[in-house]
DNA sequence: ATAGGGTTAG
């Protein structure tokens, strides 16, 4: 049967009559020779309409299998060798995303002209095969035919595919030698290429040497600056372009929009939006996506959402941008809603979606969802491939407090950059695992390629503050000066915190004088620093000064301030601050503020008032609030209220051993041993173990740690001997052991032994042995300092004529000449 | 039949 094509074939013809051909292989020359004469061959109408018919077929080929049938048809009709059609096939397959077939079609062309070469090269580029594109270009250069030379069309594509700078420079010199340098397209590509390798200077040089420029040239230069973070230069070129009367288009707009936020220039952004609406550019997805991102960065979620709603066509970037907009503005619930909607609309999440998703999960604190995100990411192998996703997952687990998982993911990642390390270090610091943070930081310093940045310092410094590692902190201080980060407010603030928490308040103050202080961040640190040293009046003074300098206090400022008041016993001032916070600065108190207030009233002995205060709270009190009141009950020996409070406390947190210890303290203090037993068995039944108390001291760049009643330290014997001598001496001048701090119901001499082996005393004795006379001793204790140790230390400071600075989990105690800076109020 | 310049991240 012979088919005669009297009319141009349509889509149905294509689909219904050609499957057998397609199955037999589109490129076979055997098939070609047999088909031109034999039974199942096709005859095309050999008239002048032939080309038009194939043109239609090219247009109809929207899927690879249809394209293959067209290819087969070309073969059987003897047109496969036609250079026009075969070149179009190369492009057709490439546009359908099948670069292998495209390449095959190209290879089948016996005599390739420059059109064919250009098509092949650009096909590679369109499919992201940049190396193949460059290889193909070099192949073109070495081809025998002297007629086939690169032309104006060749260079733009090749430049786009340069994966390294040396290729780019080589091609630039070719362009120059062959005289293609004055072409608008070629020059725009050169500008683009140099910008991609962060050589904006070279790009600018090409731009400046251009005699004629079109919109594409301006766009290339503007985007070159934008993508290298040179926002000001980008806007300058943009303005110059406007002055020259060149009208911007959607490409200009989508390049320039991302620099509005870094420049904090919402006005320019909105003016561009107006222009966009006026010229109907909003129907371009790039433009609308750019607008969504810009508004999101300014926190204008409604405007971002408006742009999104008005879009006729949305792509993955639109969805990602909207999801990230809500996620980054602290609304994970809405963000998650859009993620679900996006999936319902059939969009496949990509790496950027997952980065947002990980943050959504950590913000909403949902541990179960974190597992599914992790699985999702693993299934696609993203963790190994994409540093961004891996880091986001590490960060997610760290923020959820699941630091072991964070560590596991970190270790599975193939490639790690400085952010990966920072995320893990921050994870450890924020979960109060300072020594692990320090260990990771030290490992990181072992990798030469990883250079610590601002984020690294901000992640490790709080660990040093936490354990009082002054010398390590000072090392970092030196480093910041070396790399020019000493004026960075975040690093500066962390250093202020380190000095303050290591007992060097003067140094902290000195540093405060050198850090830019227009933001509340350094103020909060220095106010808190004075607070933990018991200098409440100074904190209040600094707060006054802050207001005078026009710096707006935030909720952290008030936490620092209120806790400063509570440490110094400034009850009235504290209450005034609390009032000021709400009435002048319209800050609603959070749990931390309430906790400070309860602490403030409770320590001052206003237990009932504190209790009333809790009852009137606007939010549900958590363990820290009840814990503050329980602590006050301990100080003032109020057993009845203590029992009531602990009931409330164990309702919200039954896991924290510290509170059981506190309650048993209250009972032990008044000799109610049955109460002590009850609490102890309660804690035991719940499987809780007492946190071991330890104290540390940093001498000569090393930190020695002492555990209560432990004799494993190499100088243990000398330490206990020294303690014996000290105890005898201070008893002579009036020290009387206070056995109420001993929880065990044992004989008196045993009680004294227990008190003497408290970790802070071991550390102090060690300090006295190892440092020269009259040196100040700095001790760090992980729990609160024991009342009897506090008393003993006062006497020790007197007889040894030493200053002893003890930092416990709550505040500082400066012992000097038989007195403590806290005035026994803590 | 072939060409340049564009949006999202930890």
Image (cartoon, helix red, strand yellow):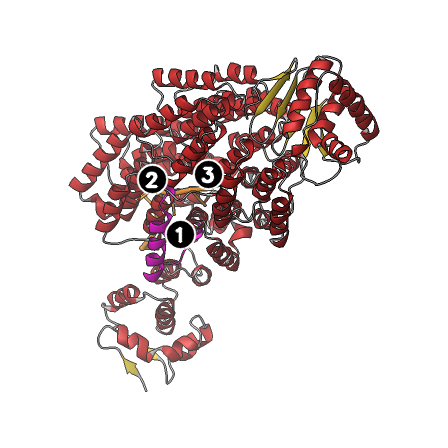
Query: Relative to A96, is A753 on the left or the right?
Result: right
The residue tagged 3 is: A625
Q: Quadrant of the N terminus of chain A?
A: bottom left
Confirm or deny contact between disc 3 and disc 1 (CB under 8 A).
no
What label does residue A185 carry, if any? 2
Above or below, A536 relative to A744: above
Frontmost of labels 2 and 3 is 3
What label does residue A126 carry, if any? 1
Q: Where is residue A48 in the image (x, y as percent from the top left)?
A: 23, 67
Determine the secondary structure under disc 3.
helix
Above or below, A732 relative to A602: above
Which residue: 76% across, 24% down?
Answer: A766
User: In terms of depth relative to the viewer, which is nearer, A647 or A408?
Assistant: A647
Please name the predominant secondary structure of the magenta segment in the image: helix
Q: From mark 2 to mark 3, how far is it between C-alphas? A: 68 Å
Can you tell which quarter of the image residue A616 is in?
Answer: top left
Confirm or deny contact between disc 1 and disc 2 (CB under 8 A).
no
Frontmost of labels 3 and 1 is 3
Looking at the image, is mark 3 or mark 1 earlier in the sequence? 1
Q: Position of residue A513 (x, y in %)?
A: 48, 14
Q: Please tell me if label 1 and label 2 are on a single chain.
A: yes
Which of the chains bears the disc numbered 1? Answer: A
Q: Where is residue A215 in the image (x, y as percent from the top left)?
A: 27, 36
The verdict on residue A339 being magenta is yes
Looking at the image, is mark 1 or mark 2 earlier in the sequence? 1
Q: Give the range drawn in magenta.
A: A328-354
């Amino acid at each position: 049967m012979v088919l005669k094509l009297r009319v141009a074939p349509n889509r149905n013809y294509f689909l219904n009559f050609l499957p057998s051909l397609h199955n037999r292989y589109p490129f076979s020359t055997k098939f070609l020779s047999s088909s031109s004469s034999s039974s199942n061959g096709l005859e095309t109408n050999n008239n002048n309409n032939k080309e038009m018919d194939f043109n239609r077929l090219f247009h109809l080929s929207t899927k690879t299998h249809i394209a293959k049938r067209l290819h087969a048809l070309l073969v059987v009709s003897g047109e496969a060798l036609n250079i026009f059609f075969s070149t179009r096939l190369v492009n057709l397959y490439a546009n359908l995303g099948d670069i292998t077939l495209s390449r095959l079609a190209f290879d089948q062309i016996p005599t390739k002209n420059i059109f064919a070469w250009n098509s092949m090269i650009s096909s590679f580029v369109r499919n992201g095969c940049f190396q193949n594109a460059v290889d193909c270009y070099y192949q073109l250069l070495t081809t025998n035919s002297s007629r086939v030379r690169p032309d104006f069309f060749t260079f733009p594509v090749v430049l786009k595919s340069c994966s390294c700078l040396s290729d780019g420079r080589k091609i630039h010199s070719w362009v120059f030698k062959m005289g293609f340098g004055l072409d608008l397209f070629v020059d725009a590509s050169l500008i683009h290429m140099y910008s991609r390798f962060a050589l904006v200077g070279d790009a600018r040089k090409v731009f400046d040497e251009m005699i004629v420029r079109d919109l594409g040239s301006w766009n290339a230069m503007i985007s070159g600056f934008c993508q290298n973070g040179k926002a000001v230069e980008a806007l300058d070129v943009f303005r110059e372009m406007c002055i020259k009367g060149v009208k911007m288009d959607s490409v200009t707009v989508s390049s320039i929009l991302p620099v509005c936020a870094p420049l904090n220039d919402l006005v320019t952004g909105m003016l561009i939006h107006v222009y966009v609406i006026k010229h109907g550019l909003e129907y371009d997805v790039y433009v609308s996506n750019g607008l969504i991102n810009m508004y999101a960065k300014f926190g204008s979620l409604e405007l971002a959402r408006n742009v999104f709603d008005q879009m006729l066509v949305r792509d993955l970037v639109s969805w990602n941008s909207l999801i990230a907009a809500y996620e980054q503005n602290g609304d994970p619930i809405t963000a998650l809603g859009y993620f679900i909607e996006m999936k319902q609309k059939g969009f496949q999440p990509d790496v950027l979606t997952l980065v947002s998703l990980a943050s959504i999960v950590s913000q909403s604190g949902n541990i179960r969802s974190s597992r599914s995100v992790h699985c999702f990411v693993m299934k696609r192998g993203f963790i190994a491939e994409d540093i961004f996703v891996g880091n986001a997952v590490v960060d997610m687990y760290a923020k959820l407090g699941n630091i072991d998982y964070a560590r596991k993911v970190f270790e599975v990642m193939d490639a790690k950059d400085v952010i990966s390390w920072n995320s893990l270090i921050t994870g450890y610091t924020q979960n109060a695992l300072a020594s692990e943070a320090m260990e990771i930081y030290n490992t990181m310093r072992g990798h030469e390629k990883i250079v610590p940045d601002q984020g690294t310092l901000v992640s490790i410094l709080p660990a040093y503050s936490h354990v009082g590692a002054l010398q390590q902190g000072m090392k970092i201080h030196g480093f910041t000066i070396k790399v020019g980060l000493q004026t960075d407010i975040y690093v500066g603030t962390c250093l202020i915190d380190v000095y303050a928490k290591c007992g060097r308040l003067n140094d902290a103050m000195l540093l405060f004088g050198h850090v830019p202080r227009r933001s509340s961040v350094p103020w909060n640190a220095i106010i808190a620093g004075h607070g933990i040293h018991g200098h409440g009046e100074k904190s209040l003074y600094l707060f006054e000064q802050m207001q005078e300098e026009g710096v707006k206090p935030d909720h952290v400022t008030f936490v620092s301030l209120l806790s400063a008041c509570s440490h110094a016993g400034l009850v009235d001032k504290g209450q005034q601050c609390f009032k000021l916070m709400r009435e002048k600065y319209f800050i609603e108190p959070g749990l931390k503020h309430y906790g400070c207030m309860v602490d403030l009233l409770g320590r001052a002995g206003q237990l009932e008032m504190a209790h009333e205060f809790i009852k009137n709270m606007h939010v549900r009190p958590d363990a820290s609030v009840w814990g503050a009141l329980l602590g006050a009950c301990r100080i003032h020996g109020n057993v009845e209220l203590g029992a009531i409070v602990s009931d409330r406390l164990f309702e919200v947190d039954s896991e924290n051993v510290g509170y059981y210890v506190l309650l048993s303290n209250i009972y032990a203090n008044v000799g109610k041993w049955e109460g002590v037993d009850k609490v102890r068995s309660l804690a035991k039944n719940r499987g809780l173990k007492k946190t071991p108390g330890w104290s540390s001291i940093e001498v000569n760049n090393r930190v020695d740690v002492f555990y209560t009643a432990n004799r494993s330290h190499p100088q243990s014997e000398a330490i206990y001997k020294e303690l014996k001598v000290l105890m005898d001496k201070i008893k002579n001048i009036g020290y009387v052991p206070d056995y109420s701090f001993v929880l065990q119901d044992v004989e008196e001499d045993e009680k004294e032994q227990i008190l003497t082996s408290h970790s802070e005393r071991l550390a102090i004795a060690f300090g006295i042995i190892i440092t020269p006379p009259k040196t100040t001793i700095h001790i760090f204790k992980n729990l609160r300092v024991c009342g009897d140790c506090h008393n003993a230390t006062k006497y020790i400071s007197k007889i040894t004529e030493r200053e002893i600075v003890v930092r416990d989990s709550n505040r500082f105690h400066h012992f000097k000449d038989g007195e403590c800076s806290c005035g026994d109020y803590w």
